Image (tube, coloured by chain):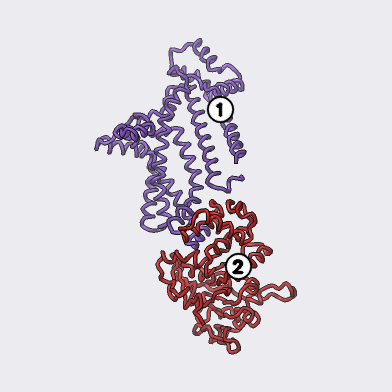
Amino acid sequence: MSTPLLQVHDLRVEYASPRGLVRAVAGVSLSLDRNRILGLVGESGCGKSTVGQALLGLIQPPGRIAGGDIRFENRSLVGLPEREMRRLRGNRLSMIFQDPTATLNPVMTIGDQIAELFRWHRPRMRRKEVQTRVTELLERVGIVDADRRSRAYPHELSGGMRQRVVIACALALDPALIVADEPTTALDVTVQAQILDLIRGLQAEHGTAVILVSHDLGVIAETCDDVAVMYAGRIVESGPTAEVLARPRHPYTAGLIASRPSITAPDQVVRPIPGTVPDLANPPVGCPFHPRCVRAVAGCREGIPALSPTREEPRHAVACPLAA
Amino acid sequence: MLPLIIKRIAYALVIIAGIAFVVSAMTKLVPGDPVDVMAAGNPGMTEADKARLRTQLGLDRPMLDQYVSYLGNALRGDLGTSLRQRVPAAQLILERLPATAELTLWSMVLALSVATPIGIVTALRRDSPIDTAGTVVAVVGVSTPSFLLGVLLILLFSVQLGWLPASGYKGSVIAAIPKAIVDGRFDLLWQKVRYFLLPSVSLAFGLMAVNARLIRSAMIETIRQDYVQFARAKGVPPRTVVLKHAFRNAIIPVITMVGLQLGNLLSGAIVAETVFAWPGIGRLSVQAITTRDYPLVQATVLITAVLFVGMNLIIDLLYQIIDPRMRHG
């Protein structure tokens, strides 16, 4: 078996804050092969977006990568000089942001914003060829009348169209990995489905690996091959999406599934997880989930449980001694 | 875009017509009437003289009538005749305008060329020693009156060091630039620049401080926008991220402020022009007021108001160019 495209080992990201050190990512390990879609799911503030930003080297002070390693295409990205990292960004690794209205620069035409990628990463490409590529990209993401639209400003497009433009930027240089950070959260439900279809279609066509960061289990279920559930800066459960969602082992995963209203069974009672996400500047002792866990026992206060494979399905791993 | 320009120009014309009304009504705002005020400083004036002056100024006619004829004359370029100097007020203003306009231009160029780098750097290095130093300079700059700075500059550079003239104006710098380039007469250019240095520095200092703060806060606001982060995620180098992605958005609010400042300067930096004996609009209005030259006061008020409105019109149109979102407004 060849080495995976991306291997993250024990990644730690910290932010200095007036209340103390916030451990936004507290030891995350994951691996991803080409042509796969991995979902990162969890509540707001669980560190899932931070993992995505760390992959692209976009953590800015007061934040920093405090430890661990990111291996991508056989090189380590942690500690890579900024110049080298910049050559990868947008080129081998790209990102789709949450809110397309805020992601596109309001004073630049969308064509210029796509063309910029060629300008910095393919400096020898002729202006005319760049224009052709921009038009092709816009057509590929489903924008009609692409040549004319490339001269439009973001405010002249709808939210869904804008997200298509952002996707065109992410795809422009045929990257090996795309991090999609809540790409559908800011969109209407009908548009959400279109955008997910688009991402999936383009991903399959190019064999790109995708990390889809989302708080929405429905989106994850529909799109991802594998899923990693994050809580308080750690992965608490991971495995093939169908397996994890059908047989959640960690009480947190089970809680997330139960707190989702169902359309097919509207009478089913929604059971929210009691309590709130812990303060990462001052996390609970032991398993970070134990204060909210319905199954917590005295032992849960001692030591942070490691992510270990379950007996029935080795690809399915869970960080809870009660569930393994 | 074209209809919008026409709309803006139409607004501007309405505003100017309103200003002209206020200006023509100024004669009613003085206790008694302007002729009484003038007579108070002129003991030799007889009742017959006063009556003649009233007719000449049209004070014996109804107010609306006065306004219509004032507006009509103004449109033909006749802003009345200076009572003291016996020449058309419009001519006096036109003679003074270039000096004020050029002082305005250089002061703003100076202020912005210092304020822009300071604003950007202090925004990027927020809460660093550089930022603190910038804050100190800004507070000093904002709270130093330009006349005080002007006097201090004169004391240092003219009286103590003798490097620069204390006052006066020796003609336009812009007009001297072509000759300097073509004939290499940079000495002639310098002769004119010398006179500009102290007044423009004393005007620019406060503007520099205000604008540096404005640019700083606008930059801090823009660099945390998603599109700046997205530009980074595309592998755009930091300098381009700051200047092309962040700064172009950050200057939008700054432009409004600069427009108002330009309007203010154009209507004559009264104090600075007085300190440096600058033959501009500001000093002309002071002279008109102190000599109770009523038509000249009216003319300077009208012209400076028109300049102000014109400046705002230009800024409005500039907005359409810089911010594509405004083009449909």
> Which x, y percent locates residue B169?
35, 29
The residue at 58%/29% (across/down) is: B17
* Residue A137 occupies quadrant: bottom right
> Which x, y percent locates residue A278?
54, 74
Q: Pointer 2: residues within 10 angstroms few (<14), some, or many (20+)?
A: some
Q: Pointer 1: residues within 10 angstroms few (<14), some, or many (20+)?
A: many
Answer whether labels 2 and 1 touch (C-beta < 8 Å).
Answer: no
Q: Chain of mark 1?
A: B
The residue at 50%/67% (across/down) is: A93
Instruction: Tell me, by letter, which chain the rendering colours purple.
Output: B
Instruction: Tell me, by letter, which chain the rendering colours red.
Output: A
**In the rendered image, which residue does mark 1 sit on?**
B20
Q: Amino acid at mark 1?
A: Ala
- SS at badge 1: helix
> Which x, y percent locates residue A298?
54, 86
**In the rendered image, which residue does mark 2 sit on?**
A202
In the image, A236 versus A102, the foreground residue is A102
Q: Is residue B112 left or right of residue B234?
A: left
